[in-house]
Image (tube, helix red, strand yellow):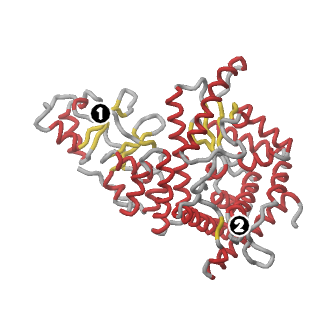
Amino acid sequence: MTVAHNSPISPAAALTGGVRDAMAPAPPVFAPEAPLSEVVAAMRSARISAVLAVDVQSRPVGILTEQDVARRVVFRLPPDAPLSAAMSAPVIACTEDAGLWRAIALLRARSLRHLPVLGPDGRCRGMLHRTDVLAAVSGRLLGHLDALAGDDAAVKQAQAGVAAALLAEGVAAPDVVGLVSGINLELHRRVLDRAMADRGPPPVPFTLLVMGSVGRGESLLRPDQDNGLILADYPDEEHGPVDAWFRDFSVDFNERLDRAGFPLCPGGIMAMNPLWRKTLPQWRRQFEYWAHRRAGAALLFADIAFDFRAAAGDPGSAEALRAHLGQVLRRAPALLAAMAAQNAGLTVGLTLWGGFADDEPGPGMRTDLKLHGLMPLVAATRLLALRDGVAATGTAERLAVLAARRAVAAAEAASLTDAFCLLLDTVLRQQLADHAAGRVPGNLVDAAGMPRAARTQLRDALRAVRSFSRGTFGDFTGHYW
């Protein structure tokens, strides 16, 4: 018995997409005490290969598959035996917001044929079937996916293999970077869950925020940490024990992330720093202070923090903070002007005569295409998105929304999106080459050594970024040169 799943999944969608697009409908559910005769008859009638046993809240507590029927029911159990006597428990499942890469790794690591997909309420939303999902993934990728089921450090290392295999199959760099970012986000959640399990329940609920490139969904192979916590509000007299718990917890969490392959942030933008561990009212006041201060660390912090998103916990608190940020910026537009003045120092990697800039210390002549390519584009797009109240944090998403609102001309947005894709592709391939050579993945690229056609494309992309970023920074500051 199999469930037909008629939506073919490309290698890109199979890994960079979520489980919702790949799952079949949820199977029938039964109480654990339901007689096996009734359950097996339903499976046969519906031509399905698995059903779930659920508790009184309709949450799965067991699963019965064809294999279970063959091994435990036929010639072994009487027809009136309860479902609980033959089902497998507990149920191994994934959440509906998980990346499909994680589900595939779990299916293979646990030798599963069926993987229920659970919603936030713990109820089954759909079912992933091993045969349907794996049919869309090439054999070249499966070995890399197996490594994604390992411990945190192994998963971080396996990113490079998955990314290289996807690029080799022609998957676009933004999709590959989206997968890498998804793995990074999942690792944050896994590390958080382990830290929580070792310390027990927190004194108040909290939301994990990720910022910077992880917040934008644009992280590459070796991003450092940019994270914080929104704590649920609590009485002032409880600050001592609450803060003590979160202080120790945050240090443990950040150190675990470091061991998993996310270096500690040199600027201290981490939950272990009290500046990045606050209640929602305190976060609101922090943003207001930055808007008033408009200098020094306030601007550096704003550039990173304003790309925040919720990685775990209550997304509503992050949405409330995003709404408040919009109010702050409407009341104090001078903050964006100050950010633009600071960002105006971000130049592209081209010399006055059209050659590629030399950013490499010593005798080398390579160009830092993250600092002098991606960052000016990201910064300029961020300013326009913040000004116009665009909720998206990803650069390509922001450009699409800005074009739809006619804040950026459609042709320019398309050109900038192409430039963004090319820069991502170039930097990612350099990082993969560094990784393969045993070096720490970096951003220095031998642009001058590329084939002529590639050099021309890169030069055109950098010129588009330079024109856009200069114009955007100038619009906010009034200084165009």
The residue that appears at 34% across and 32% down in the rendered structure is: 61
**Marks 1 and 2, Cα distance to the nearest angstrom?**
64 Å
Give the image quarter of residue 381: bottom right
Q: Is residue 391 above or below residue 169?
A: above
Residue farthest left in this picture: 75
Location of mark 1 (residue): 30
Residue farthest bottom in this picture: 452
Task: Rate crowding at label 2 as few (under 14), some (14 to 19) or many (20 or more) other CA atoms within 10 Å.
Answer: some
Amino acid type, callout 2: Glu
Residue farthest top in this picture: 237
Side of 78 where 130 appears, left or right: right
For mark 1, give the secondary structure: strand
Q: Is residue 248 above or below residue 421?
A: above
Which x, y percent locates residue 279?
A: 69, 31
Amino acid type, callout 1: Phe
Location of mark 2 (residue): 360
Side of 272 where 46 appears, left or right: left
Which x, y percent locates residue 329?
A: 79, 46
Q: How many marks?
A: 2
N-terminal of the pair, mark 1 or mark 2, is: 1
The residue that appears at 33% across and 50% down in the rendered structure is: 129
Which x, y percent locates residue 352?
A: 81, 76
Give the image quarter of residue 453: bottom right
Residue farthest front in this picture: 362
Task: Rate crowding at label 1 as few (under 14), some (14 to 19) or many (20 or more) other CA atoms within 10 Å.
Answer: many
Q: Using the image as rendered, state which of residue 352 and residue 6 is in the foreground.
A: 352
Q: Using the image as rendered, state which of residue 443 and residue 204 is in the foreground.
A: 443
Indicate which disc residue 330 carries.
none
Which x, y percent locates residue 266?
A: 70, 46
